Each structure stands twice: as C-alpha cells, then as structure tokens.
Amino acid sequence: MKKNNFVLLFLVFGTVEACIRTQPPVTTTTPKTTTQRTTTPVPPVCSKCSKNTGLTIDLTSAGAEPFTSITTGTDANGCFTQTLSCTSTVGISTISFNLDQNGSISDKPTATVTLVCTDDGTGFQFTQAGVTIDVTTIGCFPVNN
Ligand SMILES: *[C@@H]1O[C@H](CO)[C@@H](O)[C@H](O)[C@H]1NC(C)=O
C-alpha cells in the first residue's frame, strides 16, 4: 500500500515537473538585426561649385587687377562659397559685378564680397540688402598709386 502511494506521488510530481519543463518560454526574444542607417547627409547640389564655375574674373577692363585674396568655404546651407577681397594701397577698392551691369561695391582700403554657389550648382550669386544678383563676371579695381 505505502509503496503504491509513493509511486503514485512520484508519477504525479514527475508529470507536473515534466509539463513545466517542456512549456515553451512565454516571451521569445528575437535577436535584433541592426540595420546600419547611413547618417551621412547627401551633399546639396550647391556644394559642387568650384572657384571658376560659371564665373569669370575680369582682368581685361581698364584698371582691373587680380583679387588680393580668394578664400573658399561652405555656408550654413552647405553651399560652396568664395570670398574675394580687393585691396588698394592708397585708396578705395571697387568690386564690379557683371562689368558694372549689376553695379559695384567700394570700400577702403579693402572691398570684400562673398559669392554663394547657386542651388543648381552652375554659378554664383551675390546677395546684399535682400537683393540677389547672378554673378558671371567679377572684377577688382583698386587704386594703387
Ligand atoms: C543684373 O543686370 C541684368 C542686365 O542689366 C539685369 O537684367 C538684371 O535684372 C540685373 N539683376 C538685378 C538683380 O538687378
């Protein structure tokens, strides 16, 4: 009698334990596949200009001289820029836009303008006081003696 009870007990517990053991885990954790997202922003088209993209420096007009310095950079929108400085030794310097068709600016002793590559990347623009002009020719006219 006692032996039979023990066997029965064993069978009951054994069965319960076996059931627990074979139960599938409640939550299955699927390993995360880390998709590498490219975080490198696509450079804007206006970043693709170089110094002479659609731009001529006037060296043939009377009084035209090479710019004293030209430095390139990038503006807040990622557009290529170039800053041209025209310095006089004894007076005012004038920077002329499109052979004076779009005016000029003057300062003493150095006139400086920053040109920004256009959205289509084919040339340069100059903006001052809310007015933007397309600049295809630019000239430095210093007063040197
Ligand atoms: C620049 O000059 C050209 C030629 O005179 C003219 O057609 C154009 O309107 C001018 N641009 C601006 C913004 O004044």
Image (tube, rainbow, N blue to C red):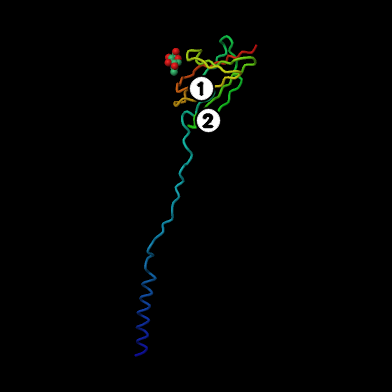
Ligand 1 is found in the corner quadrant, namely: top left
Say which amino acid is labelled 1.
Thr
| Residue 123 appearing in the image | no
Q: Nearer the viewer, residue 133 or 108?
A: 108
Viewer-proximal residue, 33 or 84? 84
Q: Is residue 72 left or right of residue 15?
A: right
What amino acid type is highlighted by mark number 2? Thr
Residue 35, image x, y percentages: 44, 47
Report, in whole angstroms, how far the alpha carbon at label 2 lies from the one at label 1: 15 Å
- Per the image, the residue denoted by label 2 is 74
Return the x and y of residue 88 as percentages of the image width and height: 62, 16
Residue 16 point in image, percent of width and height: 36, 75
- Secondary structure at badge 1 equals loop
Q: Quadrant for the C terminus, please.
A: top right
Position in image of residue 83 (x %, y %): 55, 24
Disc 2 secondary structure class = strand
| Residue 53: numbered disc | 1
Vertical placement of residue 41 versus 5, above or below:
above
Foreground pick, 10 / 32: 32
